[in-house]
Image (cartoon, grey):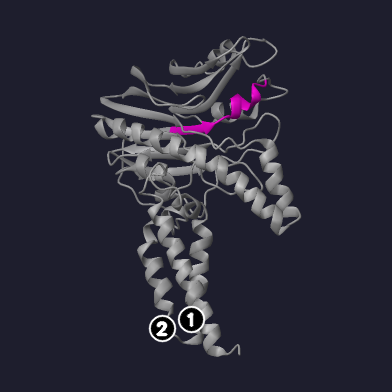
Amino acid sequence: MFNKSTANNILLTLNIFSVIAISLSLLGGYISPVKFELPIYFSLTFPVIVLINFCFIVIWGVLRRWFFLISLIAIIISYPQIATVYPIHFGKIKTNPVSKSLVVVSYNTMMNGTTQKHLKHHPNQVIEYLLSSNADIICIQEYYVRRDKAFLTANDVDSLFKNYPYKYIKFDGEYIETKTGLAIFSKYPIIKNERIEYTSIFNASIYSDIVVNEDTIRVFNNHLESNRFTGNDMLLAQQLKDNFVSKELINTSKYFSQKLSVAYPVRANQADKVAEVIQSTPYKKIVCGDFNDVPISYSYTKMKGELNDAFAKYGTEFGSTFNSSLYKLRLDYIFYDDNFDVIDFEIGIISNTSSSSDHFPIKCRLALK
């Protein structure tokens, strides 16, 4: 017979599973997917898992049972990760008065806004944002130019970005008609440029040593391994959302997990390589880029190390940077070391047109201590 005791036992069992899930989510930030893959799927659903645990706290509270402590303890332990995923700041962040600051922009431009020409009567929205940002340093992922003068060319970019006399552009793919890679543009002198060597076909990490007055700052620009989700993949997920069928959920989940299981170990190895360079850097450090991963993932945790996440320090709520109506994910980051204070941060909201990107730009002002 289904009675109150049975119902409580079922709830308790589900509660225990939810705590195991939150524990696996936390492990996903510290155990490389190369060694143990399971936690990555829990890290991806961390906000949902946290919400479920909050619900159990409320349920047990209403029932006046001590079991609410199970989820409460799990929430307390995971508070640093919750604050990273969903920061809340009341009022403006107080910083010490400074005499100098840097405006930094990081933007996965999706091939420079699909290389549309930037014209007064028909602006390329990606280029428009970058030029109007008044940034001191710009880090671009998926920097892309064509040789066909009907599209955006390298000469066009040089002319448009004339206020940035210093640059480092590293092309990973050079074809007959196109060139694609990473770019760092700076208003301040660049004294050294390097690419960080790791295995990838399309993705890369670079850095530039930039002299700002008397300070040398190493700026990293990263585009870590993509999950290789295509437009058709996104369509599959949208169709499932519009017309939920349990069988299709299983098939779609298997399909996506196969792609993730390929990308995650590759991305983890890349993060390990970049983290080594970050940790050995003798200068002040700023780390930018599209990590193609969520805030409590292994790649995020490894790359961040002892650095500060500008959004987590200044922003609020989820801070989605992936320009999708279906998935609300923060994949793009600006980290900085303790030689800086963040005094402003914003996510540039750009309408989804043919000359925009599948990512939103991120911009922050960092005060040099």
- The part of the image, by quadrant, that contains residue 156 is top right
- Where is residue 12 shown, x and y percent of the image? 48, 78
In this rendering, would 315 be left or right of 248?
Answer: left
Which quadrant: the N terminus?
bottom right
- Where is residue 259 shown, x and y percent of the image? 56, 40
In the rendering, which numbered label is found on residue 60? 1
Q: Does dot 1 land on a helix, a strand or a loop?
A: helix
Classify 68 as above or below 266: below
State the residue in front, 25 or 284. 25
The mark that comes first in sequence, 2 or 1, is 1
Q: Is residue 357 visible?
A: yes
Q: Amino acid at mark 1?
A: Trp
Residue 108 falls inside the magenta stretch: yes
Residue 25 falls inside the magenta stretch: no
Please tell me which residue is depicted at 52% across the width and 72% down the height of the picture. 55
Please tell me which residue is depicted at 52% across the width and 67% down the height of the picture. 52
Within-10-Å neighbours for mark 2: few <14, some 14–19, many 20+? few
**Which residues make up the magenta segment?**
104-116
Within-10-Å neighbours for mark 1: few <14, some 14–19, many 20+? many
Classify 336 as above or below 219: below
How many dots with numbers?
Answer: 2
Please tell me which residue is depicted at 49% across the width and 17% down the height of the picture. 171
Measure the alpha-carbon separation of dots 2 and 1. Answer: 7 Å
- Where is residue 226 shown, x and y percent of the image? 53, 34
Classify 216 as above or below 237: above
Q: What residue did someone put label 2 on?
A: 66
Q: Are marks 2 and 1 in contact (CB under 8 Å)?
A: yes
